[in-house]
Amino acid sequence: MDTITHGIAGALIGKAIFRGEDLFASHPMNRGRILTWSLMLGAIFPDSDVFRDTFSSDRLLIITWHRSITHSLLMLPLWALLLAAITRAFANSRKWQAPSFAALTAIYAVGILSHILLDLVTSFGTMIWSPLQWSRPAWDLVFIVDFTLTAILLVPQLLAWVYSHPEKVKSRAIGMCLVFLPAPWLIAKIGEIVGAPISGRAVLSAMLIFAALFLLPALQGWGLKIRHDTWNRAGFATALFYVGCTLYAHHVAYARIQKFAKLYPLQVESIGALPLPPSLWNWDGLVRADRGVYELRMDLSESPASDVELLAREHHYYPDAPPNSYIDAARSLPEVQRVLWFARFPVTRFHKEADVAVVEISDIRFVQTRRDRPAPFTYRVRFSPGGDVLSKGWVSR
């Protein structure tokens, strides 16, 4: 999950469950505001591991270090205690009325836990048992950037803010409406660029929903009758419901790709159903067989009528290159072994550029949205005719 969504989720949890106050309230810093800030910062904290990239030339840290000890359930108590101590000391220096050290520790623990869980629901993998075990569990429920979930987490907090002051309702509601109305169109443009188009009907529907959410509660002032924490609790409940829907959708998609593999039939080494943007109807079924990876894109709103129709659906096959000495040499490199440890659906390719031999290993788990660009997380090794390594690293373009 992206860091911004983690922060939004942390703030919502603080307001919905712990009765925290708005981050940027007009009154001085108090216990309620510190509570929300702490939960938000706790929810963001695990991604601080990316700062190690600044001090290292190791380009593999994204797979070997990111989402490790700062995302660990085993290390969570230590991070919560450390952050609580820092917050308590800072609050005392500013003479702010802050929650107790024990309360802050619990708050930070909840924030960090929310981050770990929101990362687990994606397909990247999170090393929750590090440093004792370096496996990467992944629940494959939500795409790593899910604008729908982000909106569900954010909009209720803004509605609570809009309807918290009767004298400012009109200006705030219209302002939020003007901010959010173009958002679906902009997201659709981004989707078009990266190869995940969104229909015009979906864009229009989203715009109408935003307009209704911000403006309808202003009619006859009924939005003012809803308490601040009620808005946030409704948002939290809706987010849980949405994740529950993704759980069901994953179950359906996984059963479909299993059926495809059985009907083909395929010698399955690994199998998975991964979410695709832009909606929870879109899934990517992947099967790692003995000589390559099969991919079946699925739209769950369309149900195959029969086994024959399922097999007839368009699918892609990514074959491994036939074995040769260059591929064997590449696979023996420590860096490539780390890439293969990370990859769930690896495909090995081989070609020559003049007299230079090129070996590429791609993880098909990560969507190649543009056919004119390399797939994400593709590692390339280039060899001289004599078998010496000329270069190695991630393919950027």
Image (tube, rainbow, N blue to C red):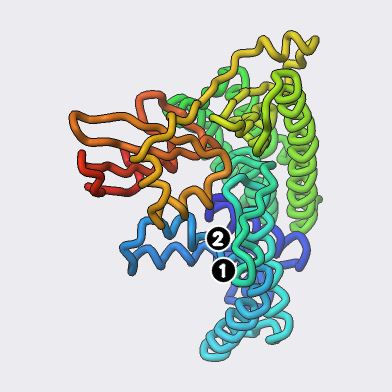
Q: Could you tell me which residue is drawn at 69 percent across and 37 percent down? A: 213
Q: Secondary structure at mark 2?
A: loop
Mark seen at residue 70? 1
**2 vs 21, nearest the viewer:** 2
Mark seen at residue 199? none
Horizontal arrangement in the rendering, residue 324 relative to residue 353 (left or right): right
Q: Position of residue 78 (x, y in %)?
A: 63, 80
Residue 97, quarter of picture: bottom right
Above or below residue 224? Residue 184 is above
Q: CA distance from mark 2 to mark 1?
A: 7 Å
**73 vs 390, nearest the viewer:** 390
Residue 108, quarter of picture: bottom right
Horizontal arrangement in the rendering, residue 315 relative to residue 240 (left or right): left
Residue 189, quarter of picture: top left
- Residue receiving disc 2: 67
Q: Position of residue 149 (x, y in %)?
A: 65, 43
Q: Amino acid at mark 1?
A: Thr
Q: Position of residue 102 (x, y in %)?
A: 73, 85
Residues at marks 2 and 1 touching, judged by CB atoms closer than 8 Å? yes
Q: Quadrant of the C terminus?
A: top left
| Label 1, residues with CA under 10 Å away: few <14, some 14-19, many ≥20 | many
Q: Amino acid at mark 2?
A: Arg
